[in-house]
Image (cartoon, rainbow, N blue to C red):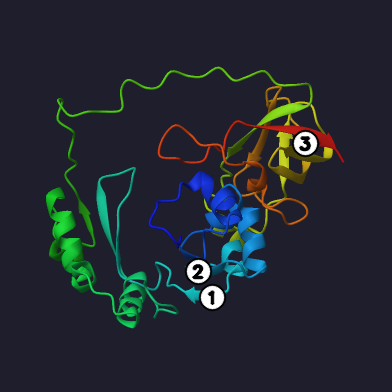
Amino acid sequence: MARSSRVIPMADFGGDYIERGEVDIVYVWNENPPVVTLPGGDKLIEAVREGRVTLIVHDPYWSETAKLADVVIPAPTFLEKYDVIYSYWHDYLVYNEPIRSPKGITEVDLIRRLARELEISHPLLLEDPWEAVDKAIRPTGATLEELREKKIVKVKPRYLPANEPDALPLPNPVEPSELSNNEVRLVFTSHPLYTNTQFREVYGDLEPVVYTHDYEGIVILENEFGGVRVRAVKDSNVPPGVALIYKSSLIDLDGKPINAITGRVKGKYAGTPLLNGVRVRVVDK
């Protein structure tokens, strides 16, 4: 929560806004990015530990962000609540039913209780959430009654008319600038077992390993935003000038987030952080 009503771009959050003291409270729901993936996570860690920022987390997992928080509110998992599940990959809606009683409070109940305590009123806070779901899914050809009865319902996809705008033309690619002898571009990829950070509770922590064409052993990756200590492994499949790291190996050997060196570089759209392609120097430790 910022003192002003401005929207804070994700790329600026950790560094600029936290460092300037423009953030008093950070409320996180069901996410780990503030500490692990958003740029400048090290600045948020410092601010919370020093008492300059109050961090409140509502999450079912004991994530890095939750461990840092001043207040942690337990949230139920999908095994403990009713919900409607959709997918990016198929045309089915799934009615999720709990198999055990909840251990936390749902986001809907929490927001409503906070609104009552703060004496905030809004029509959306008064709307029945299941009526809202029914309205939302009816344009797909499904109804809540049918979904509850059948549990899985195929929806009718809607396609954009030919005369509506689309993403074309795509932006022209930008040729990367030249690298010095000890510089590489840091890029991230997904690990098959760690599609989200909470899977570390299942499979354990991933060692901060960076795969490169030329480096081996303990190294420092550094740039104008800071430095992190990781283990470099030579891999001939990685092109020269590239450092590859798994997205769930985001805490360095000293417990510092790798995002400390991704800085405040913005992508072209909506102020989102530019995570891939950040230039770093490789220094032998």
Residue appearing at x 53%, y 46% in the figure: 12
Q: Of the numbered discs in the image, which one, if any, rests on residue 165?
A: none
Amino acid, disc 1: Val
Instruction: Answer yes or no: is residue 193 visible.
Output: no
- Report the number of discs: 3
Do labels 2 and 1 touch, CB within 8 Å?
Answer: yes
* Left or right: 64 in relation to 4: right
Q: Position of residue 223 (x, y in %)?
A: 72, 36
In the picture, measured across the screen, residue 12 lies left or right of residue 151, that is right
Q: Which residue is under mark 1?
A: 71
At label 3, counting other C-alpha atoms closer than 10 Å, the crowd grade (few under 14, some 14-19, many 20 or more) is: some
Vertically, is 18 above or below 260? below
**Residue type at mark 2?**
Val
Cα separation, mark 2 vs mark 1, equals: 6 Å
Residue at (71, 22) in percent of width and height: 240
Alpha carbon of mark 1 to alpha carbon of mark 3: how far?
39 Å
Foreground of the two, 24 or 112? 24
Q: Residue at x 56, y 42 (%)?
A: 190
Q: Of the residues under marks 1 and 3, which one precedes in the sequence?
A: 1
User: Which circle marks residue 57 in the picture?
Assistant: 2
In which quarter of the view is residue 176 placed? top right
Tell me the distance, in whole angstroms, between the alpha carbons under discs 3 and 2: 35 Å
Residue 233, labelled with which disc?
A: 3
Farthest residue in the right direction? 285
Rendered residue at 40%/22% (across/down): 171
Q: Is residue 100 above or below residue 285?
A: below
Q: Where is residue 253? Give x, y as percent.
A: 77, 52
Q: What SS does tag 2 mark?
A: strand
Picture coordinates of residue 221, whole percent (x, y) = 75, 39
Sooner in the amino-acid sequence: mark 2 or mark 1: 2
